[in-house]
Image: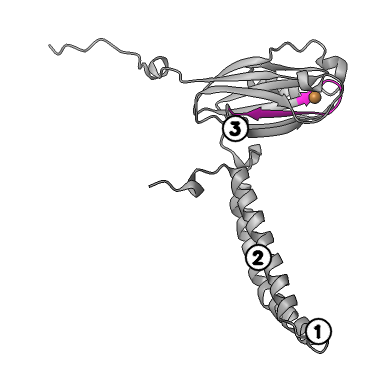
Amino acid sequence: MYYPLLTLTLQQYAAVISLSGGVIIISLALFLIFSAKGEEDKYAVKKKLYKIRGRYFFVALISALVLLVFSLRLLPYPQYQPTPDETVRVVGYQWGWLMAQGASTEEVNNFKALKKAEELRNFKGTNEITVSVDKAIRFVVTSRDVTHNFAIYNSKGAIVAQTQAMPQYHNELQYKFTEAGEYPIMCLEYCGMMHSNMLGKIHVVVTTKMAENVVPQTAPQIKK
Ligand SMILES: [Cu+2]
């Protein structure tokens, strides 16, 4: 059995929910307009509406709060995420991306302390990196010049995660790639003539667990 609703992305869910909400509100308005009979009913309709509003306000408020608590956990903000397996430093510039992996905690902290454009001049990185599938990757993103937006797309062209790349500021974005493949990076904030040339790529690969799982072996003890 195929259930199309279960295969939607988060963005498609949001679209379905807002579309349904819109349809409900418009239907309600149309129903009230057409069920009202002339001038004397205007106040009756108003009264009816106020009654509905009063009754459902708290229901709506509580639903919104519950949804907020649940949806916040889906956001890629670091404070809602577990400790990352890897941190990638990212610098956006007109017009490209520089990504660097393998920094120590100290190096990442030093990177976060860089504020001026000239301090970022010597930052070395590439616009293509390779990461492992199912690892929590934290991107620490800044810009050398103007505001950009670091957006990661999947192979189907849907955004999987994004954050602004702002000068003098570091945004942190955490994401776990659950599928191997190639994830293009594009700039999502118009930043000048060559904006569309701000491309990059993240190769997500399945690493053989061999190397990690090798337990140092000791020779068996022979009992005398
Ligand atoms: Cu840009």
Task: Name the image quarter holding the C terminus.
Answer: top left
Q: Residue at x 81, y 22 (%)?
A: 195
Of the numbered discs 3 and 1, the one sitting upstream in the chain is 1
Q: Which residue is mark 3?
A: 175
Q: Magenta part of the protein: which range?
A: 142-154
Question: Does the segment drawn in magenta span residue 98?
Answer: no
Counting other residues with Cα less than 10 Å from the Cα at mark 1, is it few (<14), some (14-19), or many (20 or more)?
A: some
- Marks 2, 3: nearer the viewer: 2
Looking at the rendered structure, the secondary structure element under dot 2 is helix
Residue appearing at x 57%, y 33% in the figure: 83
Does mark 3's beta carbon lie closer than 8 Å to ligand 1? no
Q: Which residue in the structure is indicated by mark 2?
A: 24
Above or below, 33 relative to 82: below
Real-space Cα separation, disc 2 to disc 3, in angstroms? 35 Å
* 116 relative position to 86: left or right: right
Residue 24 visible in the current orientation: yes
Q: Residue at 72% across / 33% down in the picture?
A: 163
Of the image marks 2 and 3, the number of the one nearer the N terminus: 2
Residue 105 figure quarter: top right
> Which class describes the residues within 10 Å of circle 3: few (<14), some (14-19), or many (20+)?
many
Kind of element beneath mark 1: helix
Give how far across and how far down residue 68 sits, in percent: 64, 54
Which residue type carries mark 2? Ile
Which secondary structure dominates the residues rendered in magenta?
strand
Residue assigned mark 1:
42
Q: Quadrant of ligand 1?
A: top right
